[in-house]
Image (cartoon, helix red, strand yellow):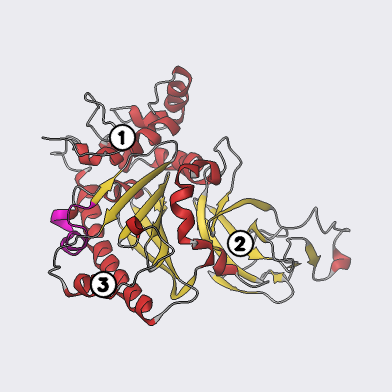
Amino acid sequence: MSRPEKAFDIPEDWDRRGLPAWTYFNEELFELEKQVLFRERWQLACHVSDVAEPGQYVTFDIAGERAIIVRGRDGVIRAFHNVCRHRGSRVVADERGQCRAAMICPFHGWAYNLDGTLRGVAHPQTLPDLDPKEMGLKPVELETWHGFVFIRFVPSEQPPVAQILARHEAEIAPYRAETFVPTKDGFWTSTSPVNWKSVRDVDNEGYHVAIAHPGLHDLYGRGYYDEPFVDGSSRSFAAFNDGPARFWSVRAYQNLLPEVTSLPETHRRAWLYIGLFPNAVLSFYPDSVMFYQEIPISPTETVIRSAAYRHAEESRELRVARYLSGRIDQITSEEDMQLTIWSNEATLSSGYEGILLSDLEYGVRTHHDHLRKAIPVFDAEQEPEPGTLAAVNARLSETGTGTG
């Protein structure tokens, strides 16, 4: 088989095996993943336009953590643990909304200013004197990159988002994603009965596009390729097929998409994807930008969360093009969901002996390598005995067994 021509070299002797089957359903591993992969690493929460005005907020939950992202009266976007300092209730319960003067806990009415400081409490005479800053909401680390808002619940040695994604900076800048605004659809979620890694395994390679996604293949043809994960990020690029399209939505999209002259010619008729390890993807289209991510609920249940954003000054042609690209994406997502279910359920079969990766699936391999580096027990072919996984992982960490 000839190797795809890419801007990277695939080792001749690379290990084509994937992760062991047990890693897709082990409860102890899932608990370790929650800490190492989701609490200690940057998570994509929203876009700056979701909190455009003072008092606007978005909530974000993952791995037992919950956050509020809110814009203050000073225009600064901040993130806090969505945990009242009184009894631990959620301070705000909705996915998104607008506060006037303060965030007020629905349990006992404790109120917090938009900068997180404690504003007031019910029946203050029944409590000791409370310092507004000391008893304010606990902050969560926050960073923005080209308009996308990232948070990190637990400090770690992971670099800043801007450093992780620095190699993509020049390519992303012309999109001016920070100027985009939300579509009327808001945040979209769906739940699938699979391990979150099964979703990543499907999404991290385009080898299956020609067979499994006829509409997407109609749009791309052979103009699609994936690049590996390197130091926490990946890149995939898809130039449109110049030939006549078979599907009406693809044909209409190709014909109606206007020239977005702010983009380089190479990107005016192409889709670009930037992956952020472990579980998020940023999509950059001529007509829109979006993100999607996996929110693990249990070893066998995952929520897929996404949102799309449009040009602030959107012409009629761009609006129609955005509708058509969204339609293509939706069909593709439905097709991928079935593939993840089939792939995931195979890990429980007595006939399952692992996978054999193609050169075109090197993105899957390098994502797995990132997992092995973060949690070395992923390298264990045999499932650790119950109650021993954390100790086995610690021992492998000390001996440097994890690959990367």
Q: Where is residue 294 in the image (x, y as percent from the top left)?
A: 39, 54
Where is mark 2, residue-wise? 68
Residue 306 shows up from this direction? no
Q: In which quarter of the image is residue 100?
A: bottom right
Q: How far apart are marks 1 and 3 (CA)?
A: 31 Å
Q: Where is residue 115 in the image (x, y as percent from the top left)?
A: 74, 62
Where is mark 3, residue-wise? 253
Q: Quadrant of residue 377?
A: top left
Dot 3 amino acid type: Tyr
Residue at disc 3, secondary structure:
helix
Where is mark 1, residue-wise? 8
Q: Which of marks 1 and 3 is nearer the N terminus?
A: 1
Q: Residue at x 53, y 67 (%)?
A: 179
Label 1: few (<14), some (14–19) or many (≥20) C-alpha neighbours in 10 Å: few
Q: Which residue is drawn at 73% across and 60% down?
A: 86
Q: Which residue is drawn at 62% across and 68% down?
A: 92
Q: Where is residue 354 in the image (x, y as percent from the top left)?
A: 20, 36
Q: Does the magenta stretch include residue 205?
A: no
Residue at disc 2, secondary structure:
strand
Q: Which residue is drawn at 62% across and 60% down?
A: 82
Taking the view exactly as shown, the residue that stands out farthest to the top is 399
Drawn side of residue 291 relative to residue 73, left or right: left
What is the magenta range? 210-223
Q: How far apart are marks 2 and 1 (CA)?
A: 40 Å
What secondary structure prevails in the magenta region? helix
Give above or below for 161 relative to 75.
above
